[in-house]
Image (tube, rainbow, N blue to C red):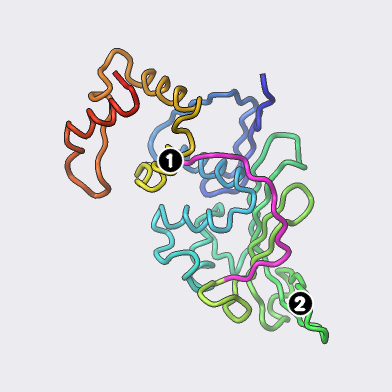
Amino acid sequence: MAKLLLDSLEINNFRGLRHLQIEKLGRVNLLVGKNNIGKTTLLEALHLYARKDGSHLIGEILQERYELRIPWMQASPDDITEALKYLFLGWKDVREHSNIIQIGPLHNPDECLTIAMDWATLQFASDGSRHVKSVSLEDLSAVDNIIPRLQFRQGQAWTTNYLLSSNYSPPSSGFLALFNHTLDDIPDLFISANGLDRATVASLWDKIALTDFEKEVISALRILAPGKPLEQAITARYLDAEAPYAYQLIDWISRLFNLT
């Protein structure tokens, strides 16, 4: 059996999770709990861990929860810094408090993802090069032109720094990415309570159609609805539509995928 991508899990200071430990994970893991207890938060943490540098993913998460009402790439630095507080335990203003999130396996700091908010100044040398200088909480009042900074780190090396300032950012962006080192993402798919949009479903189907994975998906659908004709087991509807697809279309889908 292949080695698990995560055989345990530790989450610190993410949303409402101060310190969560799961000693053992398997190939399939079931989360059960009451509403508003943190199940979605745990899945969001795993999603961020899989993406490594999740700057755009953070924007998607904040928008999904209506904590950021402006598209991430169009939001101003003030919009972003105001919304980022919802990711950190206690919802404290990230412009006034230093915050660190940690997500990863237990007892393996080299595989841990750290997401941090702090402050920096951006200095330009005579040759045009840029230098970022960190500013401590104690020195904030003594330094001019303080810029909030969002950082991602895998293990001990920072992978990406985002300065949240429109003064140094590209047009239509509220941040400037520095020291961007690409890490290998872990393939994952996060399905929110609102489900998947049609474009995502179509893209996913294109990746498996006419491959051996197609048979696996069909087998999985049969597990979800054992003993039922598949036209009764599948509910499909257009985005924002009140009624499902017409029966003839469901029947056509069943025949297309050879589902009986």
* Residue under pointer 2: 130
Position of residue 126 in the picture relative to residue 215 (left or right): right
Instruction: Specify the segment rendered in magenta.
Output: 175-190
Position of residue 189 in the picture relative to residue 70 (left or right): right
View extreme (bottom): residue: 126
* Disc on res. 191: 1
Position of residue 25 in the picture relative to residue 241 (left or right): right
Q: Residue at x 78, y 83 (%)?
A: 128
Asked which secondary structure carries label 2, the reply is strand
Q: Residue at x 41, y 45 (%)?
A: 200
Q: Secondary structure of the magenta portion, mostly?
A: loop
The kind of residue tagged 1 is: Ile
**Taking 129 as reference, is 193 above or below it?**
above
Give coordinates of residue 146: x percent, y percent: 66, 77
Q: Quadrant of residue 46?
A: top right
Give coordinates of residue 11: x percent, y percent: 62, 41
Q: Quadrant of residue 55?
A: bottom right
Mark 1 vs mark 2, CA separation in Å: 40 Å
The kind of residue tagged 2 is: Arg
